[in-house]
Amino acid sequence: MASLGNYTADRGHSTILRREKCDAYLLIHLETVLGEGFRTFLYFLGLAYCFIGLSAITARFFRSMESVVKHSRTVETIDPLTNTKIVKNEKVWNYTIADITLLAFGTSFPQISLATIDAIQNVGNLYAGGLGPGTLVGSAAFDLFPIHAVCVVVPKAGELKKISDIGVWLVELFWSFWAYIWLYIILEVWTPNVVTLWESLLTVLQFGLLLIHAYAQDKRWPYLSLPIERDERPVEWVPVEVVKYSPLNKVHDRHSEASQVGEEENSGIVDIFSIHSGEGTGHFYQNLADGDITESSTSNSGNIIPEESDIVSIWKHQFVDALMVTGSSLGNNLRQKCKLESAESQKLNNIYLRVARIFWQSLLLPWKFLFAFVPPYQIAHGWIAFICSLMFISGIAYIVTKLTDLISCVTGINPYVIAFTALASGTSWPDLVASKIAAERQLTADSAIANITCSNSVNIYIGIGVPWLIDTLYNYIAYREPLRIDNAEGLSFSLLVFFSTSVACIGVLVFRRLTIGAELGGPRVWAWVTCIFFMLLWLIFVVLSSLRVSGII
């Protein structure tokens, strides 16, 4: 099948649209006999369905990451004055490092894995593959503008969520901007249009510098941190959940349980896992603790649960939940509003809502069943679910790239335009979902905004650095030649546009902090005005970059 890299070999980009027959296909060769318009419609439909799948698995990924971050260890110390032993629990993960590594690295894993695979397939070629700087610059723009736009309007009307540690955010912002300045220096100043082995190695090493600098700022190390005090930060990375426990011998109500499960699935925040008691002919359920399975027998919650049986039962019930067509919280809220209307109108609305819910749940059913194979996040502090979720995210993102390649091939749209728009948004979709969930779940805006800025850094230092290191190392050993970058001039122009629009975006965030006291939320009207402005900045970037790489301007 044709790939983006095959198109970029033609360096005579002159128009956005090119008309030539596309012989590539996704599944079967019979696709090539279909009309171009119908094929384009099918590929866009598949793209939208992949986005739904990415949203679902990213919610599970975020939940598993929460379990990883919540993990704590017991530390024993001796009080030097009283000579008594002090036992306390300390978090294993530093929140700043967790934002950069687990959250930003995890949500950027599609770009990293796809670019690495593309680099391995491209070994021996003197030109970089198609999943290189072009796609990642487009992804950076999508991260910065549309994701900020979504996060601003996510909090409830009047609710304010601000960054509690401005110093850490400024450090992350600096390294995010420096990443693209560094990319411009490589492509236009230091070694124009080529990448050397040492440049790629320095690119990767700068990710380590980002981690050290951010950690130093979080700990307020002298000489390495900004003298900026942080606001009061919540003890927990996410707010403590209020879990409603039902009596063990209470008969299960199918409708109410289905409503609860559907509500959690649609919220994309927490999964509800229950366990069949197996007693009698009816169904009995017991809500499980939110902690790790292996630690439940020693926790202070009083829930002593057999380890092996629970692992099997929880995992089994994931498949049961996946195959259930359930209601949603939206439908429940609307039904409550309908009580104020006439009985006939209420009945009609309930029918329409039920049909809409069944249709939506039917669309989600294949994804829910597939993701039920992800082990429960209560196992091993969420690490197994975290890794499996990343594998599913990468697999779906790979299909997204194939679909966008086919859309470019069938429609004749310049592949760089596809890279700046559909491909960038497709591979950045997990970033969008994760930041949205963070803006909903967390008490501050730190993780939601840190995911955006750190994802941009990770995209360059790892997403471009590692593939470049693979190709430049091979070329240096085999040919003593550097790696060449196709259409570097158009890419440099895109970087300049990105810098200009980024300044406007960050300026708005600073203005919101100074005026209403927070980066996210606030009065509904101003939140939507900010959202529209951020989307306008993204459109400016996409249009100008597309016109430039197509040779029109």
Image (tube, grey):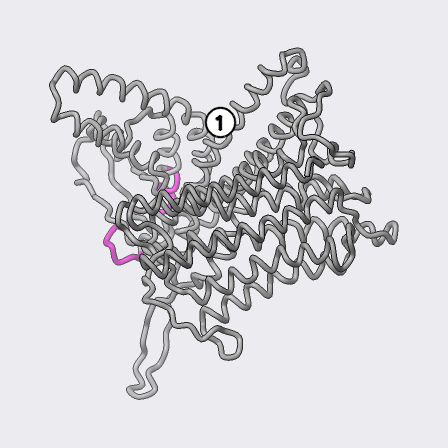
Q: Is residue 381 visible?
A: no
Q: Magenta stretch containing residue 290, yes or no?
A: no
- Residue 138, image x and y in percent? 59, 43
Q: Quadrant of residue 397?
A: top right
Q: Is residue 545 left or right of residue 224?
A: right
Note whether 311 is above or below 366 in the view shown: below
- Residue 29, image x and y in percent? 68, 16
Note whether 165 is above or below 28 in the view shown: below
Residue that extends furthest to the bottom in the rendered view of this protein:
81
Q: Is residue 96 visible?
A: yes
Residue labelled with disc 1: 49
Q: Magenta stretch containing residue 305, yes or no?
A: yes
Stretch of the chain drawn in magenta: 298-312
Q: Quadrant of the N terminus?
A: top right
Q: Residue at x 61, y 30 (%)?
A: 404
Q: Residues within 10 Å of mark 1 (few under 14, many from 20)?
A: some
Q: Is residue 333 left or right of residue 480?
A: left
Q: Quadrant of the C terminus?
A: top right
Q: Nearer the viewer, residue 165 or 285?
A: 165
Residue that extends furthest to the front in the rendered view of this protein:
553
Look at the numbered disc 1 and give the secondary structure of its residue: helix
Q: Residue at x 78, y 36 (%)?
A: 11
Q: Nearer the viewer, residue 268 or 428?
A: 428
Q: What is the tally of numbered marks visible in this picture?
A: 1
At label 1, the amino acid type is Tyr
